[in-house]
Amino acid sequence: MSDDTTTLSVSIKDLASVRVAYINYQVEGESGNSFNEIHECFQRVESWVRQHGSDPFSVLNVGALNMVEGRLLSYECCVEAPEQVQSGSDGVDVKELPGGRYAVLSIIKDPRIIGPTIGQFHQEYMPQHNLAIDGTRPTYEIYYEKTIEYCVPIL
């Protein structure tokens, strides 16, 4: 381990399941730089939730990652669904995101540090703490005004 590693802010939490409205964005090609498309998907879901009587900024905003061997295949842009909404429409679906035990890494929303911090978490923190990923549940990114909680399902 190098001397310039950042101290990670990690906690182990039992997350509750949550009903969400979502759009599943399929990542194309090898580029992996899908920020604008993912941002557009979030805006569409937020607009849909607003049309159904809820403020998308007063509920959870979650990205659910589908990764294989470190490569992002798809990204579900999720906003907590209003209770009265039972099904999706207009390209937006509704489902339950599973809860359970997660290692939760809190990160300041700074694009320069997000990737390296997540890399350090996987390369150093997970093995040092003998944590094993539960591949049956997705990894989540929960967005707040100034931070992100990067949530990895653990066994």
Image (cartoon, grey):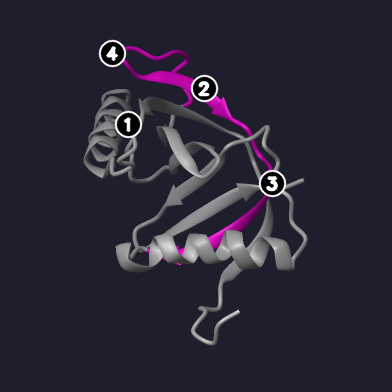
Disc 2 marks which amino acid?
Lys
N-term mark: 4 or 2: 4
In this picture, residue 70 sits left or right of residue 112: right
Q: Secondary structure at mark 1?
A: loop
Q: Could you say where residue 85 lies in the image, as x and y percent from the top left?
A: 43, 19
In the picture, the disc for residue 133 is 3
Q: Is residue 121 above or below residue 68?
A: below
The single residue placed furthest to the front in the displayed view is 30
In this picture, residue 78 sits left or right of residue 42: right
Residue tagged by mark 1? 29
Disc 1 marks which amino acid?
Gly
N-term mark: 4 or 1: 1
Residue tagged by mark 2? 95
Q: Of residues 21 and 66, which is closer to you in this image?
A: 66
Determine crowd level at label 3: few under 14, some 14-19, many 20+ residues with C-alpha closer than 10 A.
some
Q: Secondary structure at mark 4?
A: loop
Residue contact between numbered discs 3 and 2, judged by CB atoms under 8 Å: no
Q: Could you say where residue 8 lies in the image, as x and y percent from the top left?
A: 56, 72
Disc 4 marks which amino acid?
Asp
Using the rendered view, name the quadrant where residue 3 is placed.
bottom right
Q: Is residue 4 above or below residue 52?
A: below
Q: CA distance from mark 1 to mark 3?
A: 26 Å
Q: Could you say where residue 60 lies in the image, as x and y percent from the top left?
A: 44, 43
Judged by depth in the image, the label closer to the viewer, 4 or 3, is 3
Q: Quadrant of the C terminus?
A: top right
Q: CA distance from mark 2 to mark 1?
A: 27 Å
Q: CA distance from mark 4 to mark 1?
A: 26 Å
Residue at the spot 41% in from the left edge and 60% down from the top edge: 115
Residue at the spot 27% in from the left edge and 44% down from the top edge: 35
N-term mark: 3 or 2: 2
